[in-house]
Amino acid sequence: MSSAPKKDASPAEVDVVTFGCRLNSYESEVMKAHASKAGLDNAIIFNTCAVTNEAVRQARQAIRKARRDNASARIIVTGCAAQIDPAQFAKMDEVDLVIGNEEKTEASAFARLAVEGIGTERIRVNDIMSVKETAGHLVEGFEGRARAFVQVQNGCDHRCTFCIIPYGRGNSRSVPAGEIVTQVRTLVENGYSEVVVTGVDITSYGSDLPGNPSLGNLCARILKLVPDLKRLRLSSIDSIEADPELMRLIAEEERLMPHLHLSLQAGDNMVLKRMKRRHAREDAIAFCNEAKRLRPEMVFGADIIAGFPTETDEMFENSLRLVEECALTWLHVFPYSARPGTPAARMPQVEGTLIKGRAKQLRDAGTRRTASFLQSRIGKTETVLMETETRGRTEQFAELTLNTPARAGETIRARVTGTENNFLIGQCVTDEALP
């Protein structure tokens, strides 16, 4: 649910500015590949996020700045915010074209742009709810990254009352397992040690495929059929949908990373009910306890919303206590943002300064948990995937700074000697990469 923009450039001289989730990062790579193959140039593509009003505001601000800095470039806007409300971007003087979430991953759309140009049709956005399939786009590499993302699923069949994303992504649809395995194998052959399984609601994977394979079944197939893959990581999951095969892998498969990011959203049962979530706080606690029992080194991240409509002080305290009760190490806190068209936007709202204060309390609790976890790693030896020559990630997703340079992309062993500014400090214990 992050909305921080990331800018990348392709050999076709197309800049892609990415906001939001890992799935958007993946789709930005797909767009860059299509743009390069089509020969599209002198264009800036904004891949927007619609999770919060702030994400939309940031995108609009970045678009205006891009036009000031690049007077002749063609500016194209896509992503969830563009899918949900294309008109708000089309009426911006800085924008040349708005395309939808389906169109942005179609090679034909970029071929048309390269041949015909922008034209007079400023909005090319279809009805996302009519989309029934998701293709497995082959991305052979990720510029400037040590880990790769693979999309296994898109869309969502649930209708949480605060969430606008199903209207930007459509209903849930899965990529066939064979296509996913092929892409993971290609990425490993291209030198990637870690692959992140991503989507909008990945624990719903397979419900629309023959035989209804589960996420756990998919992960088991990947690990079996791509034996050279060193690390498989899951993006955000809905813990109530975790299937038995996934729990078995948590217990038995060392290549499945001991780090799960949970879509919890709240820790009070009444708030969860009003959100139309499908779990209770007791379910979240039970899942975390079971995952820790199966894999003692497991750590958790979580999304939590502060100030959901009708949230009382007592309800908020239940969410605050969940940080400790679920041993949440990496906390993503979101002040509630009313999205027009969602049921929650019509509920009695919490006052803005109260939301801000509650978000701060949650972030402070998360900071304390992070610091405690990092301190507990001092003296231990970690396996680290290097993202740069001096910075990498442990299996539990802690960031580690190495005292001596290593090669970006290699996996090394490092002994943790201290912490600083929410990351670990480590000393390499071997000069060679792990096999």
Image (cartoon, helix red, strand yellow):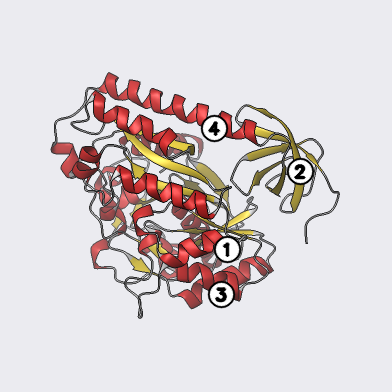
Q: Amino acid at mark 3?
A: Thr
Q: Position of residue 55 (x, y in %)?
A: 37, 38
Q: How many angstroms separate mark 4 from mark 2 (CA)?
A: 20 Å
- Visible residue check, residue 48: no
Nearest to the eye among marks 3 and 2: give it.
2
Q: Quadrant of residue 190?
A: bottom right
Q: Amino acid at mark 1?
A: Glu
- Residue bearing the label numbered 3: 182
In-image side of 340 versus 235 (left or right): left
Q: Which of disc 1 and disc 2 is earlier in sequence?
A: 1
Mark 2 — residue?
Answer: 414
| Helix, strand or loop status at disc 4 | helix
Image depth: mark 1 or mark 3 in front: 1
Q: SS of the residue at dot 3?
A: helix
Q: Secondary structure at mark 1?
A: helix
- For label 4, the residue is 370
Q: Residues within 10 Å of mark 4 (few under 14, many from 20)?
A: many
Q: Earlier in the sequence, mark 4 or mark 1?
A: 1
Q: Is residue 73 placed above or below 350 in the rendered structure?
A: below
**Residue position marked by numbered label 1 in the rendering:** 252
Assess disc 3: are there few (<14), some (14-19) or many (≥20) residues with their C-alpha within 10 Å of its C-alpha. Answer: some
State which tag comes first along the sequence, 4 or 2. Answer: 4
Q: Residue at x 43, y 51 (%)?
A: 236
User: Counting other residues with Cα less than 10 Å from the Cα at mark 1, is it few (<14), some (14-19), or many (20 or more)?
Assistant: few
Residue type at mark 4? Thr
